[in-house]
Amino acid sequence: MARLRVGVLISGRGSNLQALIDAAAAPDFPAEIVTVIANRPDAYGLARAGGAGLPATVIDHRDFGDRVAFDAALTGTLEEAGVELVCLAGFMRLLTDGFVAHWRDRMINIHPSLLPLFPGLDTHARALAAGVKLHGCTVHFVREVMDSGPIIGQAAVPVLAGDTPEGLAERVLGAEHRLYPLCLRLVAEGRARVVGEAVEIAGAAGSGAQALSMILNPAA
Ligand code: GRF
């Protein structure tokens, strides 16, 4: 079976990119990463891509006059590589409505909270301040409004007494690395379908309307 051609956009550390690289190394994984793009030349994820022998490109947003031109360059590189699905993995640039529309239902993102709670930055500190007892991460199709869009999967972790934002971030990150490959697999297999503004997972138990959810304990 042909594997879905994926382009990954990053801005920094690239640990989620690494999780996707590792998953895609399995011969039965239904997606392959065909290009990695970073908007910062110092993104550590570029070294991870290099280590995996993947083509990696820097498209520095500072080289462009406006967001439209930057996004057009992104689409150009993605389409040259024959990308069918874009995975945002710690990509810290706001995307134009035109870019989002172009890749509608063909672009997914991972966000470090249980959306729709805590869109935006500093999610772990905000979760602690709000006193929630469960926190986690979400993989979703991308829509024009930042950190919104049909949810493919979520993983929850407990918030423990004495947690710091850093400690909580680390626990959530471990969940991210498990969730993102699972969600990419569902999309690549054509099992995650956008219906209205929700995702139905074909073959899931019950009505088939249930998206992927996981609850992870810290020791898992
Ligand atoms: C992750 O927490 C991701 O959810 C968020 O940015 C962070 C990126 O980390 N969007 P990494 O670059 O994948 O290590």
Image (cartoon, rainbow, N blue to C red):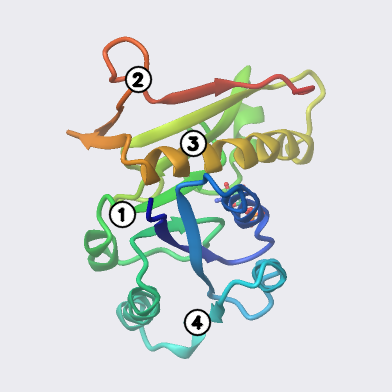
Q: Disc number at residue 106?
A: 1
Q: Is residue 137 left or right of residue 7?
A: right
User: Is disc 1 surrounded by few (<14), some (14 to 19) or many (20+) residues within 10 Å?
Assistant: some
**Quarter of the rendering containing residue 71:** bottom left
**Quarter of the rendering containing residue 122:** top right
Q: Disc number at residue 59?
A: 4
Tell me if the residue at label 3 has its CB under 8 Å from ligand 1: no
**Is any part of residue 188 visible from this angle?**
yes
Q: Secondary structure at mark 2?
A: loop
User: Badge 2 is on which residue?
Assistant: 210
Q: As shown in the figure, which amino acid type bears the numbered disc 3?
A: Thr
**Considering only vertical position in the picture, is 215 above or below 192?**
above
Query: Who comes first in sequence, dot 3 or dot 4?
Result: 4
Q: Secondary structure at mark 3?
A: strand
Instruction: Provide residue 182's location: percent of width, then percent of height.
Output: 51, 37
User: Badge 3 is on which residue?
Assistant: 138
Q: As shown in the figure, which amino acid type bears the numbered disc 4?
A: Ile
The residue at 55%/28% (across/down) is: 155
From this viewpoint, which residue is outermost toward the top?
Answer: 206
Q: As shown in the figure, which amino acid type bears the numbered disc 2?
A: Gln
The residue at 41%/46% (across/down) is: 147
In the rendered picture of this protein, how many numbered marks are placed on residues?
Answer: 4
Quarter holding the C terminus is top right
Q: Are marks 2 and 4 in contact (CB under 8 Å)?
A: no
Q: As shown in the figure, which amino acid type bears the numbered disc 1?
A: Arg
Tell me if the residue at label 4 has its CB under 8 Å from ligand 1: no
